[in-house]
Image (cartoon, rainbow, N blue to C red):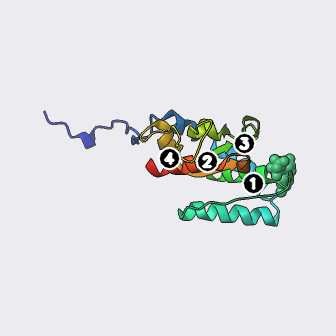
């Protein structure tokens, strides 16, 4: 007997992706697009002209895939976290990944899905000019970073420059 597979109405299995078993990636993609779009719709209208300019510039760098680094400075209460929230919601509503990190545990609590930069990237506690992060090539943590479209680092100037250099060095080797 010959079975013609096309004629058997078997359910189609979803395409498997290499990252489907990475719980860190699954966790970062576990946001409801419908809920995100609902709050986005309201909050996007509230943006000031200055916030909109920053939002557009960062988002177009993400969309164009050109990469880049942006430093946003402003007095307390001028809406930096408000902007991080909008950027995160926009990118997450598309099913893409944003890594929200902060220099301190307290600051990370204000970010959606926030973690300390030390914990997210495995930055050593006392870095020097030769330090690298503990994140290793091929690990779930490394694949999460590679899959991410944007990293938001709140209160970045609170950290030693060696932390950024360690991360930069490590990202090159992933
Ligand atoms: N365009 C806006 N429309 C309405 N509310 C806003 C807007 N921008 C900021 N806010 C609100 O103002 C308050 C302060 O904003 P936010 O916490 O984002 O400031 P911040 O610059 O991150 O402050 P800090 O540096 O102290 O952490 C928040 O309640 C935020 O929701």
- SS at mark 4 in the image: helix
Camera-side residue: 97 or 173? 173
Is disc 3 surrounded by few (<14), some (14 to 19) or many (20+) residues within 10 Å? Answer: many
Q: For the residues marked 2 and 4, what is the alpha-carbon distance in whole angstroms?
A: 12 Å
Farthest-out residue, front: 129
What mark, if any, has residue 162 been given in the picture?
2
Give percent across and percent down for residue 85: 73, 49
Q: Give the alpha-carbon distance from disc 3 to disc 4, as whole Å.
A: 24 Å
Disc 1 marks which residue? Answer: 83
Q: Earlier in the sequence, mark 4 or mark 1?
A: 1
| Mark nearer the viewer, 4 or 1 | 4
Q: Position of residue 45 (x, y in %)?
A: 79, 59
Badge 2 or badge 3: first in the primary sequence? 3
Q: CA separation, marks 1 and 2?
A: 27 Å
Q: Position of residue 41 (x, y in %)?
A: 74, 54
Residue 93 visible at all = no
Q: In this view, does 131 lie above or below 59?
A: above
Q: Which of 66 and 9 is in front in this view?
A: 66
Residue at (72% x, 42% y) in the render = 111
Residue position marked by numbered label 4 in the rendering: 170
Q: How far apart are marks 3 and 1 (CA)?
A: 11 Å
Name which quarter of the figure residue 131 lies in: top right
Q: Which of marks 2 and 3 is in front?
A: 2
What secondary structure is marked by label 1? helix
Label annotation for residue 111: 3
Q: How far apart are marks 4 and 1 (CA)?
A: 28 Å
Could you tell me which residue is drawn at 57 percent across and 62 percent down?
63
Q: Which of marks 1 and 2 is nearer the N terminus?
A: 1
Residue sitting at x 26%, y 41%: 7
Name above or below for residue 1 compared with residue 158.
above
């Amino acid at each position: 007997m010959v079975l013609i597979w096309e004629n058997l109405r078997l359910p189609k299995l979803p395409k498997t992706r290499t990252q489907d078993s990475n719980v860190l990636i699954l966790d970062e993609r576990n946001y409801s697009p419908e809920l995100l779009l609902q709050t986005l719709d309201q909050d996007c209208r509230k943006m000031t002209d200055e916030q909109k300019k920053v939002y557009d510039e960062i988002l177009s760098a993400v969309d164009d895939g050109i990469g880049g680094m942006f430093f946003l400075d402003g007095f307390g209460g001028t809406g930096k976290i408000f902007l991080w929230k909008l950027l995160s919601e926009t990118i997450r509503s598309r099913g893409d990944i944003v890594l929200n990190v902060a220099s301190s545990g307290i600051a990370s609590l204000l970010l959606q899905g926030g973690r300390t930069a030390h914990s997210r990237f495995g930055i050593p506690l006392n870095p020097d000019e030769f330090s690298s992060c503990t994140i290793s090539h091929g690990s779930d943590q490394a694949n999460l970073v590679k899959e991410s479209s944007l990293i938001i680092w709140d209160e970045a100037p609170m950290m030693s420059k060696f932390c950024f250099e360690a991360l930069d060095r490590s990202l090159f080797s992933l």
